[in-house]
Amino acid sequence: MEPSIRVVVVEDDIQYLEEISLLLRSSSIDIVGTYTTGKSGLKGILEKKPQVALVDLGLPDISGIEVIRELLHRGSKTELLVLTVYDDDEHLFSALRSGAIGYIVKSEATPSEIAKAVKEVVRGGAPMSPGIARKVLKSFREFEEIKKEKTIKELTPREQEILEYLSEGFGPKKIAQFLNISYETVRVHLKNIYRKLQVNSLIEALATYKRGKTIGRWGDE
């Protein structure tokens, strides 16, 4: 038989609190505490030390984010899973930065999916509603683009010149002749280009270069 998971629920909507607690109890989940305020929830989690806490963000005294942040500060081992109506970036990333392991939007999850998310947390997962997962992925991609833009701007004019020749199909030896420098000097420039662009091959370097030109990140910006 699957062992029960010890869970605390912090939720100010009493009807929703009762409904979700009833469902979780029928899914091999042991509700060891329910709380309707942030301060009582914080105290209850510290005292009962559940494996998982479902935490709403819009609580009447202190916010769920403050609860999560304080638990992390106090070294709590409880995994904190946000269960909220908020699906905006500000609440999402504030909660994740504060220490939440997952983020479930009430309107995007059925009660059975919430129970599944709790079990996923115990198995080491980080469950998120589909819409939230897309936001996180989009943010990650934007971060990678910003990071790539910074590395592009680190290239010297000579390194950009070599990449331009390479994009036109000229090899390192021919480029050395055009620029009146040694073949070894071109190779050194290529190594520096790879390092700055965080790539491992000429193909990757050229792909990054062409993408940068397309979106206007090269030249005298």
Image (cartoon, rainbow, N blue to C red):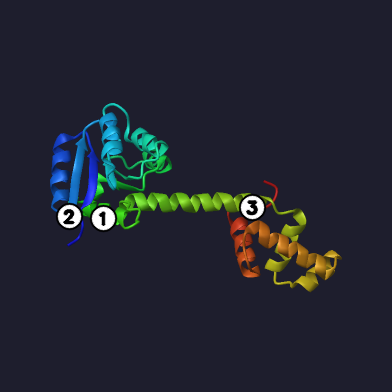
- Dot 1: element: helix
Residue furthest front in the image? 47
Q: Which amino acid lies under the numbered mark 1 shown in the image of this protein?
A: Lys
Describe residue 128's horizontal placement relative to residue 210 as left or right: left
Answer yes or no: do the residues labelled 1 and 3 have beta carbons within 8 Å?
A: no
- Could you say where residue 49 lies in the image, as x and y percent from the top left? 29, 42
Q: Nearer the viewer, residue 143 or 221?
A: 143
Taking the spot 17% from the left edge, 49% from the top edge, the residue there is: 24
Describe residue 181's horizontal placement relative to residue 198 as left or right: right
- Dot 2: element: loop
Describe residue 15's horizontal placement relative to residue 71 as left or right: left
Dot 1: within a 10 Å radius of its alpha carbon, few (fewer than 14), some, or many (20 or more) residues?
some
Q: Counting residues from the N terminus, which is met first, the one under dot 3 or under dot 2?
A: 2
Q: Nearer the viewer, residue 201 or 126?
A: 126
Q: Which amino acid lies under the numbered mark 2 shown in the image of this protein?
A: Ser
Dot 2: within a 10 Å radius of its alpha carbon, few (fewer than 14), some, or many (20 or more) residues?
some
Q: Nearer the viewer, residue 149 or 188?
A: 188
**Residue 172 can be seen, yes or no:** yes
The image shows residue 171, relative to residue 40, as above or below, that is below
Q: Tell me the tag on residue 151.
A: 3
Taking the spot 34% from the left edge, 34% from the top edge, the residue there is: 67
Q: Counting residues from the N terminus, which is met first, the one under dot 2 or under dot 1?
A: 2
Q: Tell me the tag on residue 28.
A: 2
Work out how far the residue at label 1 is from the one at label 3, CA to CA, in angstroms: 41 Å
- Could you say where residue 214 lies in the image, as x and y percent from the top left? 59, 57
Q: Counting residues from the N terminus, which is met first, the one under dot 1 or under dot 3?
A: 1
Q: Residue 190 is drawn in which quadrant?
A: bottom right
Residue furthest right in the image? 180
- What residue did someone put label 1 on? 119
Work out how far the residue at label 3 is from the one at label 2, CA to CA, in angstroms: 50 Å
